[in-house]
Amino acid sequence: MKKDPNLDLLNAADELGYEARSAKGDHAALKLWLRLLSSTNQIETEIRRRLRVQFDTSLPRFDYLAQLYRAPDGLRMKDLSSYLMVTGANVTSVTDELERDGLVARSSSPTDRRSWIVCLTPKGRQVFETMAQAHEQWILELFACLQAPAMAQMYQQLGNLRVHVLDKQSVALPSTPIQTT
C-alpha cells in the first residue's frame, strides 16, 4: 500500500508551534484556532526574515509604505497611526527614519496647523514597488501548496468566521470572572 505524503505533512504540522499544545481529545475548533495561529505566525516570521535579508527593512516599515502607496496625496500622521494600529510616537519614529532615507516627505496640513501630511517621495514609491513585487511573489510561493478552489473556500470560510466573531463581540460578557481551580 502506497503511503500518502500529504498525511505525513499533516502529521508533521501537528508537532509544530502552538499545535503541539493540543491533545487528541481537544475540540476541532481549538485545534483549528491553534493551526491558524501557528500558520499566521510562521508566515509572518518568514516575510519579516525576507524583508530584512533582501531589503534591510522591517515589516512595520513595509506596512507604513504600503499605506502611503495607497494614498497618492499622502496621509495625516494621525490617520497613519490609526491605519497601522500603532501609537503616534511609533509613527513619528518611523516617519523620521524614512524621511532621513529619502523615502517620505512631511509637510504641514493646509487645513490644520497642528497636523502633518506624509507622502511617498518618487524614490519611496520606486523602493516600495520593488518590495511589493517581491512580497507578492513570496506570498504566492508560500501558498503554492494550496489549490485555487481550496484557497477560495478557505477565504470564504475565514470571512464567515470573521463576521461571526464580530457578531459575538457585541455579546455581553459576565460581569464577574469565571473562577478556575
Image (cartoon, rainbow, N blue to C red):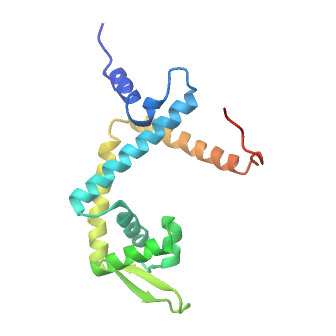
In which quadrant will I find the N terminus? top left
Q: Is residue 136 above or below residue 18?
A: below
Q: In the rendered view, does 27 fall on the left or right side of 88? A: right
User: Horizontal placement of 104 versus 29: left or right?
Assistant: left
Q: How many marks?
A: 0
Q: Residue at x 36, y 67 (%)?
A: 61
Q: Residue at x 30, y 14 (%)?
A: 3
Q: Is residue 167 visible?
A: yes
- Residue furthest to the top: 1
In the depicted view, which residue is nearer to us: 178 or 107? 178
Q: Residue at x 57, y 32 (%)?
A: 29
Q: Is residue 128 left or right of residue 82?
A: left
Task: Name which residue lies at 40% across and 38% down.
Answer: 148
The answer to whether residue 71 of the structure is visible from this angle is no
Where is residue 32? Give x, y as percent. 51, 33
User: Residue 133 appears in which quarter of the rendering?
Assistant: bottom left
